[in-house]
Image: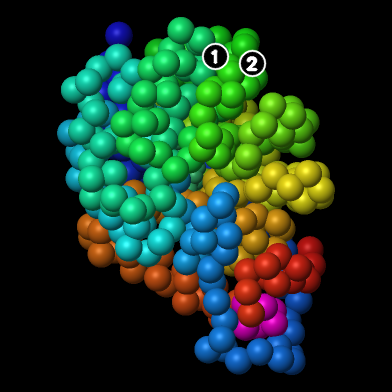
Amino acid sequence: MHSHSNRKRDHIDICLGPDIEHASSSGFDGYQFVHVALPEIDFEDIELQVDFLGHTISAPLFISGMTGGITDAVSINGELAELCSDMNIPFVLGSQRSMLHDRASDESFTIARRRAPNGLISANIGATEIACKEDHPRILAIIDRIEANFLTIHANPLQELFQPEGNTKFSGVLRGIEQIRERTEIPIIVKEVGSGISLDVAKKLHDIGVDAIDVAGKGGTSWSAVEMKRNQSEFSEYFREWGMPTSYCLLSLREYCGTVGMSMMSSGGIRNTHDIAMSIAMGAKAVGMARPILLAYHENGIQAVQALLEDHMKNLKRIMFLTGSKHCNQLSNAMFRKI
Ligand SMILES: Cc1cc2nc3c(=O)[nH]c(=O)nc-3n(C[C@H](O)[C@H](O)[C@H](O)COP(=O)(O)O)c2cc1C
């Protein structure tokens, strides 16, 4: 039997290695912006700030949930939370499942709030934990212990299927989310982990009061590939590549989310500034990365993560200039074509 901390350690080690991304991309490379030869704006006036779930953030970016519950996560979560707070962008913690039953793992999560007292921090818990009503008081308590600004719930049926110790009891998840919705005021975000969220699922989530969908589609880290590395006898090319590309998810949800006023977030295979800008043009409010952040952190520490994010901000402004977008909400209306 693998413990939670062994699993989280394995995930980091495997994600730092090769061959765990989907074979095909998140799909943004299949689209090109229409170039605006007369932008009618001054480059220096371009602003990246956006309204996001009741807060004004300085750029349409966030760091996706990764880790917690292991010793290494204390420095990773502490440093990432502080950087995000300094940059005024949201930071999502990794799954807080271990906090439900083990106070010893608290430090790797509570450090985020201590290092970022004013930061925008999201709690994170799995769909299968939410399905279990007896855990609700503990889930509410771990949200409070980090004074979370948002709650992210990850739905990961493919990963659970291939995880050696996976939990595939997904009945009652919607009801569980609805009950948690009734008991907390903070915005609730539901995400996948790399297989994407469909229109039908987004509608069900909106109907029970979920505030935002992070589509977390295919094209980056494949969580079935990660779990298959932990259990090599289960290898299957078909399931390794299962899922819907991030760009496809955004385009499928865009109209509905716009009509009902549900925020859409983009993640899963965001690998360059074009992916970020195209996500916004396809309707996303904010765009997140996981593995690229982990790789940068491993390579050269928190400075490398900061440089990566700043580089994206610089290039995002350039794309905004060339599409005549002074603000991100104008980039949302930028024209693009399939290539
Ligand atoms: C090392 C690592 C650990 C992760 N752990 C979690 C987690 O605990 N909870 C979660 O919601 N997502 C987790 N994820 C998934 C990411 O948040 C993201 O949805 C997914 O990796 C796709 O994004 P990417 O292609 O940018 O990596 C993890 C990702 C990485 C790289």
- Between 63 and 268, the residue placed more toward the observer is 63
Vertical placement of 296 versus 320: above or below?
A: above
Task: Give the residue pinned by disc 2.
Answer: 175
- Between 19 and 34, the residue placed more toward the observer is 34
Residue 300, horizontal then vertical, whole percent: 23, 60
Q: Quadrant of ligand 1?
A: top left
Disc 2 Cβ-to-ligand 1 distance below 8 Å: no
Marks 2,1: beta carbons within 8 A:
yes
Residue 113, horizontal then vertical, whole percent: 29, 44
Residue 236, horizontal then vertical, whole percent: 55, 24
Q: What amino acid is at disc 2? A: Arg
Mark sitting earlier along the chain (2/1): 1
Residue 4, horizontal then vertical, whole percent: 30, 20
Residue at left offset 42%, top offset 72%: 311
For residue 240, say whether it is visible.
yes
Q: Quadrant of residue 274?
A: bottom right
Q: Quadrant of residue 330?
A: bottom right
Residue 3 is a magenta residue: no
Under tag 2, what secondary structure?
A: helix
Left or right of 179 in this view: 88? left
The magenta segment is 320-325
Task: Give the residue pinned by disc 1.
Answer: 131
